Amino acid sequence: MVFDLRVRPEAEQDLAEAFRWYELQRSGLGHDFLHHVQAGFQFLERTPLVFPECYHGVRQHLIKRFPYKIFYKVEAQTVIVLAVVYGGRDPEWVKKRLQKS
């Protein structure tokens, strides 16, 4: 079964900021980042329940090659992406961010 995937506006903003940062590091790297995020999204559409809940129903998926995590919830047949955050972020900051979602 394939789940629907919805990306919250806050997560879209995360992606835009990370894209800009990677593009400043090297031209094309931002596009590579987005390609890996898209691969992560496709994986979550197929198997969102493979990762355990880490915080109040929120699960996380590590993006390959880049030190970012996709934080998401599964509601019925929908994967809701709450945030795409640098993996080195302070866990307390991440919890506060997820509480707002």
Image (cartoon, rainbow, N blue to C red):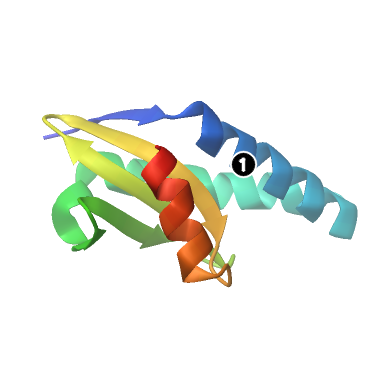
Q: Is residue 40 visible?
A: no
Q: Is residue 11 visible?
A: yes
Residue named by callout 1 = 15
Q: Position of residue 1 (x, y in %)?
A: 11, 35
Q: Position of residue 4 (x, y in %)?
A: 26, 27
Q: Secondary structure at mark 1?
A: helix
Residue type at the position of mark 1: Leu
Q: Residues within 10 Å of mark 1 (few under 14, many from 20)?
A: some
Q: Position of residue 37 (x, y in %)?
A: 51, 48
Q: Find residue 52 and report its image quarter.
A: bottom left
The residue located at (54%, 55%) in the rendering is 85
Count up the numbered dots. 1
In the depicted view, which residue is nearer to us: 32 or 75?
Answer: 75
The residue located at (54%, 34%) in the rendering is 10
Q: Quick check: 81 above or below 88?
A: above
Q: Find residue 72 and report its image quarter.
A: top left
Task: Left or right? Give the position of 47 relative to 76.
Answer: right
Task: Say which quadrant the C terminus sits in.
Answer: top left
The residue located at (72%, 43%) in the rendering is 17
The residue located at (47%, 66%) in the rendering is 92
Task: Left or right? Give the position of 20 relative to 83.
Answer: right
